[in-house]
């Protein structure tokens, strides 16, 4: 993130809601990139920071927790190219510990929850393999299916590929084998196999992999199992899933059972009954890490007894009885060859250090984020400096510090540009009219004349929650811009009218045959009518996310009223930095809108370029008003929560229906909650609602209520 986050204790409810929405979008994107596409965009450490901030804000503002909060999400949505397998027992992720105190807190929470009054608690400790989680189902001892974690509830059917791994038995061995056995573990690639694979890929002029984890995941998702078989993957078994019966009562006994059935288990797994033992074993494993021959990124601690695990249960997306103690980010030294400026959709100038390539944890890195000009000044980074970088994943790392003793005598401080490197427009740091402080981000004022902003705005315009054209994603829309077919997003609706010779040329380009072009025209015409909230969101106004766009659409009802109100509010700012205008007062008084969002709207609609663009867009597009809330409905004014798996309608449909009937939908149960709709699998939210005496409805009862 380029902008330093505001301290959680200084957030207002409005800013907290905005931050939660931003974090949800960013974390969802990274979950899909990491788990679903095997192409992570940030490091593990950076991802952990995002999750920690989301958790901290939710703890400070529990009433603002989103219904689809990242703290309730596991993994990613399964990809479409594989069949789906529903997990009988959810495959949840683990909470994280980063230092000794976190482990102490984990141990003491277990003690308090179970009421053990300081009695020793036995926990297992084992390396956390950096691979791909898989679940194996056996019936009558025979392997019948294998799946990825997926979103924790549903995974991808990769049975045929898992059968190519020799450490996964296709038939269990031993005298005691229950009718149903579900074994969970981690698929990984050794360092030696990873090196050999990349050498083969280079020799055949194919894409190489960034690290063994990506290579293992990519190999396991091959549609041709022969490719998987040639990658020599490995498997460690570490947990049970659905079991028809079992004759063991502890984690350690289950691991022994796995060995008897023919699985490989990690030899470094041990059991301890105190924090000191856990920490000592963590230190030992960290020391052994470079010699193991496979990647690990921490140590997992689990309560040994299954009956205690059952009593402890789960909180949000993770079990209370287990935690992952992560290793510190790996570090290396290298040179800063240059500092380049990237320009984003909103004109933000973001500096990136171009590094002398260096291997960190088996990955060659050549870029490092520098966030903003204040960060460069704080760390005193000069071009030509020797710096310490760190990473815990496989993408852009961070600069930890400058090695000052190796700085050249003629080195000079980096001067951040005052003009956009793309279009040459002035780049300024905005002044907060309330605090008088400058924003940490310097922004290009070129707007739509800046090519960088145009391409990023085009990507946003066609994104899933905006116009979402079938067959016209970010890659294709930038192609059209580069080819001169469009100059802005409004031009998309005119491309079918382009000269036939021009389209004949395009049809010959790679990926653009007759069928693709014809489908594109159909997709564009299907979007000539669009919901007002999606229209507002597609404009790409700073601070206007999906929820804020929906709220604005409900408040102003039509595009005509919305535009006239925004223009009326966009009068010049007074000498004291305030806006004196009834339309502005109406805007800032809306629920969820404060000065930050209001000023962003005012600035956007004060720009003639933006108004001209909207006029041009509305010439081709009609907006659909959101359905008005029914204030006479049985849930009007009620605070509602949906939990569990809804089977008749989707969660989004249910929320939209509730909001259209005048209800306020929140993501967490509190004393303010009026109604909880609980589907199958409802857990802690249902228990809390029952304890608070809140009205609980089944999905069928909810549908009957709103149908009447």
Image (cartoon, rainbow, N blue to C red):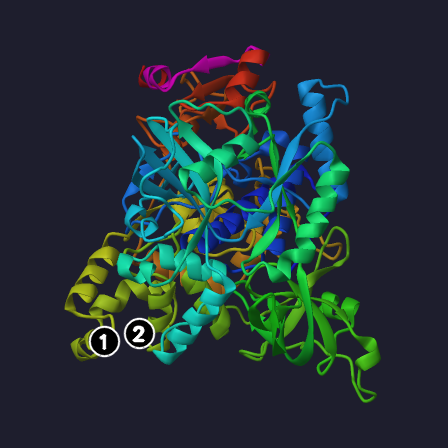
1 or 2: tag closer to the N-terminus: 2
Residue pointed to by mark 2: 485
The image position of residue 502, as x and y in percent, is 21, 78
Q: Mark 1 or 2, which is nearer the eye?
A: 1
Asked whether 693 falls inside the magenta stretch, the response is: yes
Q: Categorize mark 2 by other alpha carbons within 10 Å: few (<14), some (14-19), many (20+).
A: some
Judging from the image, what secondary structure is the residue with disc 2 in? Answer: loop
Q: Categorize mark 1 by other alpha carbons within 10 Å: few (<14), some (14-19), many (20+).
A: some
Asked whether 48 falls inside the magenta stretch, the response is: no
Figure check: 614 above or below 56: below
Taking depth in this image into account, of 450 and 94 the one nearest to the observer is 94
Q: In this view, does 102 lie to the left or right of 635?
A: right
Circles 1 and 2, Cβ within 8 Å, touching? The answer is yes
Res 506 label: 1
User: Picture quarter containing residue 491?
Assistant: bottom left
Which residue reaches farthest bottom? 410
Q: In this view, does 674 lie to the left or right of 519?
A: right
Quadrant of the frame with the N terminus: bottom right
User: What residue lies at 33% left-to-right and 35% top-to-bottom?
Assistant: 138
Q: Give the range drawn in magenta.
A: 692-704
Residue 478 appearing in the image:
yes
The image position of residue 120, as x and y in percent, is 73, 26
């Amino acid at each position: 993130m380029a902008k330093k986050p505001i301290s959680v204790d200084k957030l207002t409810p409005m800013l907290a809601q905005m931050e939660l929405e931003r974090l949800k979008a960013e974390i969802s994107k990274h979950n899909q990139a990491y788990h679903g596409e095997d192409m992570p965009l940030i490091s593990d450490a950076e991802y952990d920071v995002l999750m920690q901030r989301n958790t901290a804000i939710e703890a400070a503002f529990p009433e603002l927790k989103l219904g689809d909060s990242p703290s309730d999400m596991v993994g990613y949505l399964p990809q479409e190219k594989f069949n789906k397998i529903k997990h009988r027992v959810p495959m949840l992720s683990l909470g994280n510990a980063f230092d000794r105190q976190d482990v102490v807190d984990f141990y003491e929470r277990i003690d308090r929850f179970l009421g053990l009054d300081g009695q020793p608690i036995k926990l297992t400790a084992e390396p956390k393999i950096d691979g791909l989680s898989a679940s194996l189902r056996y019936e009558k001892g025979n392997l019948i299916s294998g799946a990825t974690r997926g979103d924790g509830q549903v995974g991808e059917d990769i049975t045929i590929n898992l059968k190519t791994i020799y450490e996964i038995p296709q038939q269990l061995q031993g005298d005691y084998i229950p009718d149903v056995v579900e074994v969970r573990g981690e698929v990984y690639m050794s360092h030696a196999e990873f090196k050999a694979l990349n050498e083969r890929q280079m020799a055949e002029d194919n894409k190489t992999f960034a690290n063994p984890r990506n290579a293992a995941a990519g190999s396991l998702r091959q549609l041709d199992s022969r490719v998987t078989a040639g990658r020599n993957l490995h498997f460690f078994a570490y947990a049970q899933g659905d079991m028809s019966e079992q004759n063991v009562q502890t984690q350690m006994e289950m691991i022994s059972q796995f060995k008897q059935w023919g699985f490989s288990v990690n030899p470094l797994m041990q059991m301890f009954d105190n924090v000191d033992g856990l920490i000592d074993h963590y230190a030992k494993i960290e020391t052994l890490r470079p010699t193991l021959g496979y990647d690990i990124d921490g140590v997992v601690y689990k309560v040994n007894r299954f009956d205690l695990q059952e009593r402890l249960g789960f909180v949000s997306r993770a079990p209370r009885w287990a935690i992952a103690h992560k290793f510190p980010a790996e570090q290396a030294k290298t040179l800063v060859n240059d500092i380049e400026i990237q320009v984003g959709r909103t004109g933000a100038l973001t500096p990136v250090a171009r590094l002398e390539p260096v291997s960190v944890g088996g990955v060659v890195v050549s870029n490092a984020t520098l966030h903003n000009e204040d960060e460069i000044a704080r760390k005193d980074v000069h071009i030509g400096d020797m710096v310490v970088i760190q990473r815990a994943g496989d993408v852009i790392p961070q600069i930890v510090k400058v090695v000052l003793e190796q700085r050249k005598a003629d080195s000079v401080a980096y001067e951040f540009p005052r003009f956009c490197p793309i279009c040459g427009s002035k780049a300024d740091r905005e002044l907060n009219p309330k605090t008088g402080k400058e924003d940490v981000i310097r922004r290009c004022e070129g707007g739509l004349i800046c090519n960088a902003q145009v391409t990023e705005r085009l990507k946003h315009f066609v994104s899933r929650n905006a116009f979402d054209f079938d067959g016209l994603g970010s890659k294709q829309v930038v192609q059209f811009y580069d080819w001169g077919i469009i100059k802005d997003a409004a031009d998309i609706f005119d491309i079918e009218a382009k000269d036939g010779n021009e389209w004949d040329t395009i049809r010959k380009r790679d990926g653009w045959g007759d069928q693709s072009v014809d489908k594109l025209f159909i997709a564009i015409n299907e979007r000539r009518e669009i919901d007002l909230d999606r229209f507002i969101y597609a404009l790409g106004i700073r601070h206007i996310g999906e929820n804020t766009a929906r709220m604005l659409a409900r408040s102003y009802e039509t595009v005509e009223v919305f535009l006239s109100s925004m223009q009326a509010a966009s009068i010049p700012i007074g000498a004291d930095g305030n806006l004196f205008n009834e339309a502005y007062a109406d805007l800032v008084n809306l629920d969820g809108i404060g000065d930050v969002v209001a000023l962003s709207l005012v600035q956007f609609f004060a720009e003639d370029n933006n108004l001209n663009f909207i006029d041009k867009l509305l010439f081709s597009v009609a907006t659909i008003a959101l359905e008005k809330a029914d204030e006479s409905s049985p849930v009007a004014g009620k605070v509602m929560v949906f939990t569990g798996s809804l089977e008749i309608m989707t969660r989004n449909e249910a929320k939209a229906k509730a909001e259209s009937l005048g209800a306020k939908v929140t993501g967490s149960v509190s004393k303010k909650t009026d109604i909880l709709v609980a589907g199958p699998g409802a857990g802690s939210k249902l228990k809390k609602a029952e304890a608070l005496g809140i009205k609980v409805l089944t999905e069928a009862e909810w549908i009957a209520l709103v149908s009447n």
